[in-house]
Amino acid sequence: MDNRIEIPLSKVKLLLLLLASSGFVVLGVFFTFSPAKFQSSLFQKPSIIQVIGLVSLLFFALCLVVIVKKFFDKKVGLAIDDKGIADNTNGLSVGLIPWEDILGIRVIHVFTQKIIMIDVKNPEDYINKAKNGLARRSMKANWKMYGSPLSIISNSLKINFDQLLKLLHLELEKRVDLDR
């Protein structure tokens, strides 16, 4: 396909994410099994520290699994062509998002993280394409909180956030002019 743009996954970024997640897993283990060592004026009760540690441990262990899978994934991270956007950037990726389904592209901020949201006509269809129950629940939560189940995170791609956002907007504008 002549008009295909492929953005590979960045092994360097994935390695950094792997190291950061590993650090949070280790902290989670310490918080869970040695909460008294982390008592402070902010966190006085060991039970609260244990809960924080357990949540951190579970969440970042799950992140580690996804990151390791992506590290060895041979597929391109994101592909843009005449059919649509083929997303393989994160654990919630559902593959091809056809242009005719896309209503818009926007940015949300979750803490310091910028995330690209893809608004689609039929969000339930994409939720039903989820690979597993956890992904399905996460996509439903994204839909309720942010208005769309589909997100693209540039953290794992060989492109910076602003370049990716600009590229997606340009490609969508091309298709809007041609198809609508």
Image (cartoon, grey):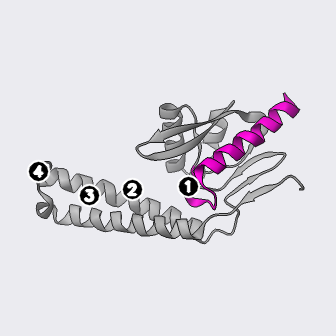
Residue with the mark numbered 1? 91
In the displayed structure, would residue 51 be above or below residue 170? below
Residue type at the position of mark 3:
Gly
In the displayed structure, would residue 24 be above or below residue 47? below
Residue type at the position of mark 1:
Gly
Residue lying at the far top of the rendered structure: 180
Label 3, label 2: how far apart the Cα atoms are: 10 Å
Residue with the mark numbered 2? 59
Q: Is residue 4 left or right of residue 136?
A: right
Label 3, label 1: how far apart the Cα atoms are: 23 Å
Q: Under tag 3, what secondary structure? A: helix
Give yes or no for contact between labels 4 and 1 (Cβ–Cβ under 8 Å): no
Residue toward you, 142 or 154:
154
Residue type at the position of mark 4:
Lys
Give yes or no for contact between labels 2 and 1 (Cβ–Cβ under 8 Å): no
Q: Residue 168 shows which numbered tag? A: none
Q: Is residue 172 magenta?
A: yes
Label 2, label 1: how far apart the Cα atoms are: 13 Å
Q: Position of residue 102 (x, y in %)?
A: 72, 35
Q: Give the mark nearest the N terminus, 4 or 2.
A: 4
In this picture, which residue range is highlighted in magenta?
A: 153-180
Residue type at the position of mark 2:
Phe
Quarter-of-image position of residue 36: bottom left
Q: Residue 45 shows which numbered tag? A: 4
Residue toward you, 84 or 47:
84
Label 4, label 3: how far apart the Cα atoms are: 13 Å
Residue with the mark numbered 3? 53
Q: Give the mark nearest the N terminus, 4 or 3.
A: 4
Q: Under tag 2, what secondary structure? A: helix
Q: Give the mark nearest the N terminus, 3 or 1.
A: 3
Q: Residues within 10 Å of mark 4 (few under 14, many from 20)?
A: some
